[in-house]
Amino acid sequence: MLGFLKGDPKKKLQKAYEEKLAKALHAQRNGDLRSHGTLMEEAEKIYAEIKALDENP
C-alpha cells in the first residue's frame, strides 16, 4: 500500500556505480593504479547487480 515510500534499489545501485566510476577515474588521473583497479572491481560487481535486477523485474 505504501510502496511509494520504498526506494528504488536499481536507482540506488546506479548512483553507487557512478560514484565508484568517478572515484576510479580520479585515482587513475592521480597515478594511483592500484586504487583504480580496486575501485573498478567494485564498480563491476555493482554493475552485475544492476544487470541481475534488469533480468528479474
Image (spheres, rainbow, N blue to C red):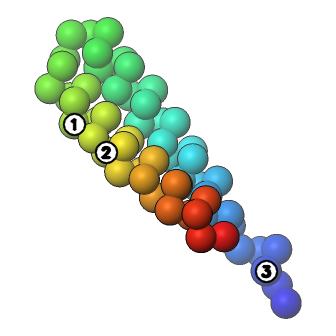
What residue did someone put label 3 on?
3
For residue 34, which quarter of the picture? top left
Q: Quadrant of residue 24?
A: top left
Residue type, mark 3 in image: Gly
Separation of marks 3 and 2 at Cα, in angstroms: 30 Å
Q: Residue at x 59, y 70 (%)?
A: 56
Up the image or down, 6 lies above or below 22; here it is below
SS assignment at label 3:
helix
Q: Are marks 1 and 3 in contact (CB under 8 Å)?
A: no
Where is residue 19? Give x, y as percent.
Answer: 48, 36
Q: Locate the C terminus and report the quarter of the image it occupies.
A: bottom right
Q: Which residue is mark 2?
A: 42
Estimate how packed mark 1 is, as few (under 14), some (14 to 19) or many (20 or more) residues with alpha carbons within 10 Å: few
Q: Describe the element under mark 1 as helix, strand or loop.
A: helix
**Up-down: is 3 above or below 19?**
below
Q: Element type at marker 2?
A: helix
Q: Residue at the front extreme?
A: 55
In depth, the one of 45 and 8 nearer the eye is 45
Q: Nearer the viewer, mark 3 or mark 2?
A: 2
Disc 2 marks which amino acid?
A: Glu
User: Dot 1 corresponds to which residue?
Assistant: 38
**Residue 53 location (% of width, % of height):** 56, 64
Which comes sooner in the sequence, label 3 or label 2?
3
Q: Given contact means CB atoms under 8 Å apart, are the residues at marks 2 and 1 in contact? A: yes
Q: Is residue 42 left or right of residue 1?
A: left
Residue located at (58% from left, 63% from top): 55
Say what amino acid the circle numbered 1 marks. Answer: Thr
